[in-house]
Image (spheres, grey):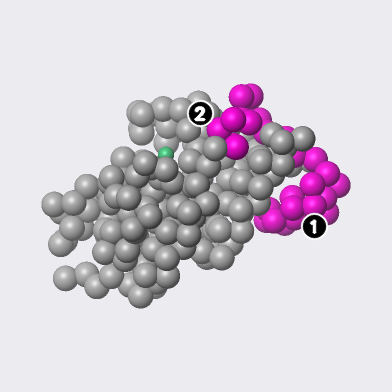
């Protein structure tokens, strides 16, 4: 029997707070983490994120297959994206997904460009507001295999640890929940600011 790590409760609390800020309407989005035993945990499919609790995480292998005793449960439909991000960036411990509205409104092109905003410093390795930040926008796809190989081809564009999916939402990741949440809030804020100007 796999024990749910204590971190899952802290993470579920964060997920409920993100829901209050509009990141996960109508049971959408999904979240994952890797625990101290290198086990991968992802939210199960179809749960209301306003009531997310630690038992909503299930343990899967690196290909997305539920592990004992979770075989009867269905992981999120986008689990393949999580597995791919962990493969591409081995330092990743937490992945967040958001259906926040402003990024969806703003992302009508292949790339989102932010320039001059103080909060650009919320992205990894950015120390000044003066540079230009480019965040890629990928086409939406239900075909996980083709999206996974597409992601690998775009790896060079992912240095800010965030990508947007057109008319869908965005993914962020980090070596901790603190880092992943900071990037989520940074991107969310910048999209709202750029849309509102
Ligand atoms: Zn989604």
Question: Which residue does the numbered mark 2 point to in the structure image?
Answer: 167
Q: How busy is the neighbourhood of tag 2: few (under 14 within 10 Å), some, or many (20 plus)?
A: some
Which portion, as a residue range, is magenta?
102-131
Residue 63 magenta: no
Provide residue 93's location: percent of width, then percent of height.
Answer: 47, 62
Image height of 70 relative to 194, above or below: below
Label 1 CB-ligand 1 distance < 8 A: no
**Residue depicted at 77% across the width and 35% down the height:** 197
Image height of 170 relative to 92, above or below: above
SS at badge 1: loop
Provide residue 75's location: percent of width, then percent of height.
Answer: 27, 48
Along the horizontal axis of the image, is 175 left or right of 72?
right
Q: Residue lying at the far right in this picture: please name it.
A: 130
Q: How busy is the neighbourhood of tag 1: few (under 14 within 10 Å), some, or many (20 plus)?
A: few
Residue 115 magenta: yes
> Looking at this view, is 71 or 44 the one in front?
44
**Residue depicted at 42% across the width and 59% down the height:** 16
Residue 2: quadrant of the picture: bottom left
Identify the image quadrant of the N terminus: bottom left
Q: Residue lying at the far bottom in this picture: please name it.
A: 6
Provide residue 101's location: percent of width, then percent of height.
Answer: 54, 37
Question: Which residue does the numbered mark 1 point to in the structure image?
Answer: 127
Mark 1 or mark 2, whichever is nearer to me: 2
> Looking at this view, is 29 or 82 the one in front?
29
Quadrant field for ligand 1: top left
Regarding residue 40, the answer to whether it shows in the image is yes
> Looking at this view, is 88 or 110 the one in front?
110
Counting residues from the N terminus, which is met first, the one under dot 1 or under dot 2? 1
Image height of 108 relative to 20, above or below: above
Along the horizontal axis of the image, is 150 left or right of 188?
left
Image height of 89 relative to 2, above or below: above
Residue 147: quadrant of the picture: top left
């Amino acid at each position: 029997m796999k024990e749910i790590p204590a971190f899952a409760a802290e993470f579920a609390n964060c997920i409920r707070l993100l829901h209050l800020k509009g990141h996960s309407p109508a049971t959408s989005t999904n979240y994952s983490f890797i625990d101290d035993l290198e086990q991968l945990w992802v939210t199960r499919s179809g749960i209301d994120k306003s009531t997310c609790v630690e038992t909503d995480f299930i343990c899967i292998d690196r290909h997305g297959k539920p592990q004992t005793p979770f075989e009867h449960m269905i992981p999120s439909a986008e689990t393949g994206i999580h597995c791919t991000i962990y493969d591409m960036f081995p330092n990743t411990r937490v992945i967040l997904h958001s259906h926040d509205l402003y990024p969806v409104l703003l992302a009508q092109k292949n790339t989102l460009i932010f320039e001059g905003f103080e909060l650009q410093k919320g992205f990894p390795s950015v120390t000044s507001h003066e540079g230009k930040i480019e965040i890629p926008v990928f086409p939406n796809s239900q075909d996980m295999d083709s999206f996974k190989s597409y992601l690998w081809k775009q790896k060079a564009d992912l240095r800010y640890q965030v990508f947007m999916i057109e008319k869908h939402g965005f993914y962020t990741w980090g070596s901790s929940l603190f880092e992943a949440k900071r990037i989520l809030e940074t991107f969310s804020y910048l999209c709202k600011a750029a849309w509102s100007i």
